Image: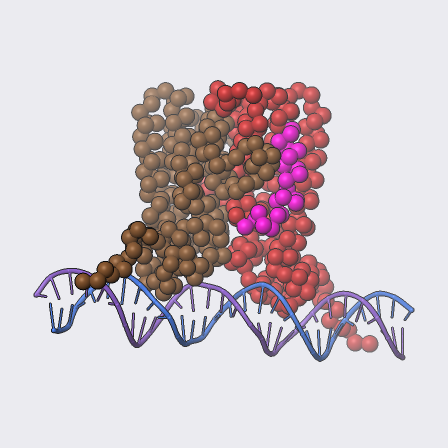
Chain colours: A brown, B red, C purple, D blue
DNA sequence: AATAATCTTGAACAGTTGTTCAATGGCCGT
DNA sequence: ACGGCCATTGAACAACTGTTCAAGATTATT
C-alpha cells in the first residue's frame, strides 16, 4: 500500500476545475478576453491545456463560467440592500440606502486581491462592444439593474425616466473607475491617495452621488414635459 | 499621356496613412488592442498589411499614433475651459465651469460616429492594466488631469487631498460609462433613453456631479485631521 | 533625363492561437 | 477481477498572429 500522489492536498487543495477557474480569473483580468491565452491560464493552473476545453467546452465557456460563479453573490447582496431600503419610509433617507445597495456589494470585491480581479473583468466586459454578443450582462446583471432603477424612481416620484436612468448610469460609471484603477490615482495624487482602500472609496463616492441625486438642479434636466 | 490612377481621389481622398489611421480607430474600438488584427485593419483600409509596419513601425505604434492624433484636441479644449473657469471669481459658480471643462470636451466626441470610436478606445485603455506599460495616459492625459484636480481644490479650499481626488475620479468614472455604453442604457429603459444624445448626457451628468461636489456630507469624508 | 528618396506590394517567416483526438489513468460499484 | 465512468494527458491540427523582406511603383530632386 504505497502513498499515492492523490492530488497533493497541501500544495493546492482544490480540484483541477477550481484551479482553472481561479487562474483564469486573474489572467482574464490582467489581459482581457482576447489578450489572455488558454495556455497561459493552464500553465498558471498547473494543468494541461486540453483540460480547459474538457471542463468548459471553450475559452468563451470558461469566461462565462467565471461570471456564473461570481455574479450571484453580488446580486444577492444588492437585493438584500434593496430590501432594507424599501423598509425605510422616509424617501430622503431611503435614497441613501439605495445608492449603498448598488455600491457596497461591488466594492467588497476590492481589497481582497482574488476578487478584485473579478471587478476588473466586469469593467472590461462593460467596455467591450462584443459583450452584447456574449449576453453576460443581459443574463446576469440586468434584472437587478431594473430593480435599482425602480427603487430610484420610487425615491423621486416626480423624476422623468431620463433623469432616473441617467442617475443610475452616472453612479454605475463612477463605480467602474474605482474597480479598474491601477495606480493612476496614486500617481496623480503623488502617492497620497490610493484606490486600494475600498472603504474610503465607497464612502467618498456614496457621499458625492447621494448629494448629487438629492440636490441637482432639475431645471437643466427635467425636460420639456411628461 | 494616359490618365494614371493617381490615388483615386473621388473614392477615398486620403493618403494611405490617413486611411489606416481611420480604419484602425474603428477596429481598435470594436475589438480592443489584442482582439484587433492588423490584417483586419488593413483590409478595411484597402491597403496591404505591410504598409502598417512601414508607416507606424508596429501594431503598438499604430495604436499610439491614434492617441497622438486625437488627444491634443481634447486636452486643448479642457485647458480652454479651465481658463474660463479661473476667470470666474465666485467659487460656487466656478466649480460648475470646472466640471464642464472636464466633461464637455470628451462628450463632443460622441454623436459624430467616427470620434465615438476614439471615446471607446480611451475607456478600453483606461480599463486595461497593460496601459501602464504603454504610458499613453501618463504622457498625454495626466498633465491636464493635474490641472483639473488643482482647479477643484481651488474651488473648495478646505477639502482634503483625498476628497479632491475622489471627486475627480468619481467624475471621470461617470464620464467613462457614457462613452462606452453600447445599447445597455436603451435596453434597460425599454428604448426610451439612449446614450447617443451626448448633449442630454452631459446635461444630466454635470447636474448630478456639480450638486454632488457642492452638497455632499463632508462629515463622512473629511477624515480625522489635516 | 537621370538619380535619389519615398511609398507600395505580395509573398514568406516563425510563432502562437483555440480546439480536437486517441490513449491513459484512477476510482467506484459489482 | 471486472467493466464502466470520469478525469487527465501530450501530441497534433489548421488557422491566424505580427513582422520582415526583396522587388516594384511612384514621386521628388538634381
Q: Say which quadrant the N terminus of chain B sits in.
A: bottom right
- Left or right: A178 as drawn, with respect to C2: left
Q: Say which quadrant the C terminus of chain B sits in.
A: top right
Does B114 sit above or below residue A204?
Answer: below
Q: Nearer the viewer, residue A163 or A144?
A: A144
Residue A175 visible in this rendered orientation of the protein: yes
Q: Does B136 appear in magenta?
A: yes
Residue A162 position in % (x across, y down): 48, 35
Residue B34 position in % (x across, y down): 53, 57
Please provide the residue range marked out in magenta.
Answer: B130-151
User: Residue visible at 52% across and 41% down?
Assistant: A181
- Left or right: B26 as drawn, with respect to D10: right
Q: Nearer the viewer, residue B59 or A146?
A: B59
Q: Nearer the viewer, residue B138 or B25?
A: B138
Which quadrant holds residue C10? Answer: bottom right
User: Residue visible at 43% across and 38% down?
Assistant: A111
Prevailing SS of the magenta stretch: helix
Residue A53 visible in this rendered orientation of the protein: no
Count every numbered label the image shows and give the total.
0
Residue A219 position in % (x across, y down): 54, 25
Q: Does A153 appear in magenta?
A: no
Which quadrant holds residue B48? Answer: bottom right
- Left or right: B96 as drawn, with respect to A178: right
User: Residue visible at 75% across and 69% down?
Assistant: B6
Q: Nearer the viewer, residue B84 or C15?
A: C15
Residue B20 position in % (x across, y down): 65, 60
User: Residue visible at 45% across and 34% down?
Assistant: A198
Amino acid at each position: 500500500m504505497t502513498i499515492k500522489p492523490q492530488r497533493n492536498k497541501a500544495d493546492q487543495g482544490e480540484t483541477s476545475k477550481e484551479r482553472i477557474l481561479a487562474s483564469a480569473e486573474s489572467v482574464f483580468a490582467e489581459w482581457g478576453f482576447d489578450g489572455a491565452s488558454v495556455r497561459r491560464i493552464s500553465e498558471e493552473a498547473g494543468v494541461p491545456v486540453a483540460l480547459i476545453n474538457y471542463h468548459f467546452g471553450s475559452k468563451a465557456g470558461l469566461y462565462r463560467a467565471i461570471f456564473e460563479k461570481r455574479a450571484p453573490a453580488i446580486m444577492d447582496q444588492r437585493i438584500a440592500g434593496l430590501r432594507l431600503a424599501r423598509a425605510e419610509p422616509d424617501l430622503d433617507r431611503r435614497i441613501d440606502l439605495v445608492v449603498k445597495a448598488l455600491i457596497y456589494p461591488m466594492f467588497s470585491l476590492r481589497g481582497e486581491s482574488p476578487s478584485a480581479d473579478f471587478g476588473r473583468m466586469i469593467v472590461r466586459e462593460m467596455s467591450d462592444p462584443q459583450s452584447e454578443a456574449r449576453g453576460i450582462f443581459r443574463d446576469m446583471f440586468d434584472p437587478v439593474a431594473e430593480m435599482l432603477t425602480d427603487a430610484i424612481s420610487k425615491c423621486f416620484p416626480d423624476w422623468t425616466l431620463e433623469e432616473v436612468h441617467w442617475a443610475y448610469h452616472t453612479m454605475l460609471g463612477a463605480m467602474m473607475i474605482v474597480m479598474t484603477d491601477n495606480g493612476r490615482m496614486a500617481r496623480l495624487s503623488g502617492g497620497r491617495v490610493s484606490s486600494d482602500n475600498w472603504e474610503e472609496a465607497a464612502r467618498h463616492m456614496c457621499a458625492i452621488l447621494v448629494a448629487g441625486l438629492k440636490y441637482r438642479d432639475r431645471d437643466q434636466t427635467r425636460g420639456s414635459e411628461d
